[in-house]
Amino acid sequence: MQFVIAAILLVLQTPGILHQSGSVTGVVKNRQGIPIPDTRVVLTPSDGDGIGTIEGLAKSDAEGKFRIDNIPAGSYHLAVGPVDKLIYHPGVEDPGRATIVRVANGLVTSVPVMVLSLSRVTGRIIDAKSGTGRSIESFVFSSGIEIFKPAMHQDGSFSLLVPPGTYVVIGNDPAVVPFAEFLTVPDGPLDELEFSASRLPEVRGTVGNKWGHPIAVKSIFLRADPANTYVDSNMAAHNKTSPVDSNGSFAFSGVIPGKYTLEISTNGARTITQSIQVGTESLDVRMVVPFGEVTGQTVP
């Protein structure tokens, strides 16, 4: 037993076995001193031979702090952001002006605070009718070059850090009217924004004759107007078919605002149409089938 313990101690004391690497710690903040959480931090070789090589990476915590362990001894650049657009410590795009971070075996290297030109943006998405907060499926800030996705909560509140500039704020969800708004982010905090999300309206109505008697129709077709502009650019996806019950009633749910045509085919191979304009409120429509243009049996 003593022999085994002595052997282990000998191995641990052998040069090159113990403390084969070092660590790097630091903090990421914006120019207002606000910690930047959930930011990818990387180390890349500073000698130029390892361009595109990442020796270590970590993510900043809620206080903007990070720690990268198991880094071989050497000289590095500390950077944040995507590989094709790194920002180097202390906050420059040119690696030639970046801080040289020297890592030694068995030591922890603490770097000064890294300052990024990012502004804090906070706000909330609210339901247009109730005024209560709600989350949506897709919510992004687009600069035209980059897309930033805020952290969103169930109550509709959101927050993110972005460079100052002009953005298009785009909201999409299967249950709400898509929206897009321009927003200018200053060099500093921008708080308490509100974006209103309207639920998709319903188009409902009845089919009947000129005397108001319902007509038994197999189905009715809602055709999207080619002039409509949709975020998904898929016109056909917004065409809908609805059954018509014995009372001549029909309903289309989740209709995106725009121009549409309601269509009914008659026994005489004629199509009866009616143009409608759908807004953010549900729409009630009455379609009249002329006498003699019956598609089924008139309901007394």
Image: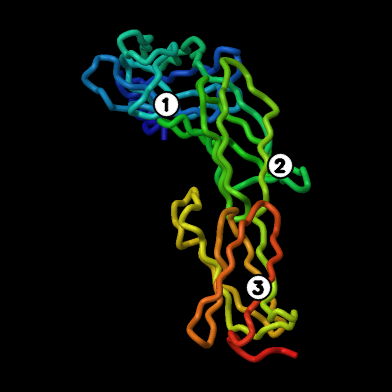
Give the camera-side residue of 134 and 44: 134
Q: Are marks 1 and 3 in contact (CB under 8 Å)?
A: no
Q: Earlier in the sequence, mark 1 or mark 2?
A: 1
Assign a secondary structure to mark 3: strand
Q: Are marks 2 and 3 in contact (CB under 8 Å)?
A: no
Q: Quadrant of residue 82?
A: top left
Q: Position of residue 292 (x, y in %)?
A: 60, 87
- Residue 20 visible somewhere in the drawing: no
Q: Nearer the viewer, mark 1 or mark 3?
A: 3
- Residue 190 visible somewhere in the drawing: yes
Assign a secondary structure to mark 2: strand
Residue at 64% in and 79% down? 244
The residue labelled by disc 3 is 287
The disc labelled 3 sits on which kind of residue? Met
Residue at 65% in and 85% down? 216
The disc labelled 1 sits on which kind of residue? Gly
Give the camera-side residue of 177 and 29: 177
Q: Is residue 219 above or below residue 238?
A: below
The residue labelled by disc 1 is 81
Q: Quadrant of residue 260?
A: bottom right
Quadrant that contains the C terminus: bottom right
The residue labelled by disc 2 is 126
Q: Position of residue 52 (x, y in %)?
A: 28, 27
